[in-house]
Image (cartoon, helix red, strand yellow):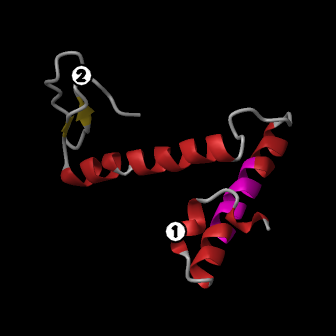
Amino acid sequence: MIPYPANQKCRVKGLLRVDKKFRTHGPSKKKKKYYKRQIIEAVYSFQKNQWSLAINKVRGLKKVTFYVLFNILSLVLKREAAENIGRPDKALSPTFFNT
């Protein structure tokens, strides 16, 4: 969680703050970690669209967790297969390995 103090004059050291225009203020290590968030959200968005993670057809935390982990495993294996055949550009294609 990224705190957003109302007055932006927090006296706590080592706190990462984000203003209304999404500019970060705080330690450089925490800023770098915050900017990696965009990459992770892009991967999750891709998975939601391509592998229908937005609408689950299972119920229960255990089953949903298994469903999501299975999809992540398939993503990793597909990327590795694309690297092994020398076509890393096909790692994002949802239909290239279907034949």
Residue at horizontal 61 percent and vertical 59 percent from the top: 93
Main SS, magenta residues: helix
The magenta span reads 68-77
Q: Which mark is residue 18?
A: none
State the residue position of label 2. 20
In the rendered structure, does residue 42 fall within the stretch colored magenta? no
Residue 99 lies, in percent from the top left, at 79, 68
Q: Secondary structure at mark 2?
A: loop
Q: Nearer the viewer, mark 1 or mark 2?
A: 1
Residue 84 lies, in percent from the top left, at 61, 83
Quick check: 48 left or right of 25?
right
The image quadrant of residue 73 is bottom right
> Distance from label 1 to label 2 (Cα)?
37 Å
From this viewpoint, which residue is outermost toward the top?
A: 6
Q: Which mark is residue 89?
A: 1
Quick check: 25 left or right of 2?
left
Residue 6 lies, in percent from the top left, at 23, 16
Relative vertical location of residue 35 with respect to residue 97 in this rendering, above or below: above
**Amino acid on which the number 2 mark rests in the picture:** Lys
In the rendered structure, does residue 76 fall within the stretch colored magenta? yes
**Amino acid on which the number 1 mark rests in the picture:** Asp
Relative vertical location of residue 3 with respect to residue 72 in this rendering, above or below: above
Q: Secondary structure at mark 1?
A: helix
Front residue of 80/28: it is 80
Residue 43 lies, in percent from the top left, at 53, 50
Residue at horizontal 25 percent and vertical 21 percent from the top: 5
Residue at horizontal 76 percent and vertical 57 percent from the top: 70
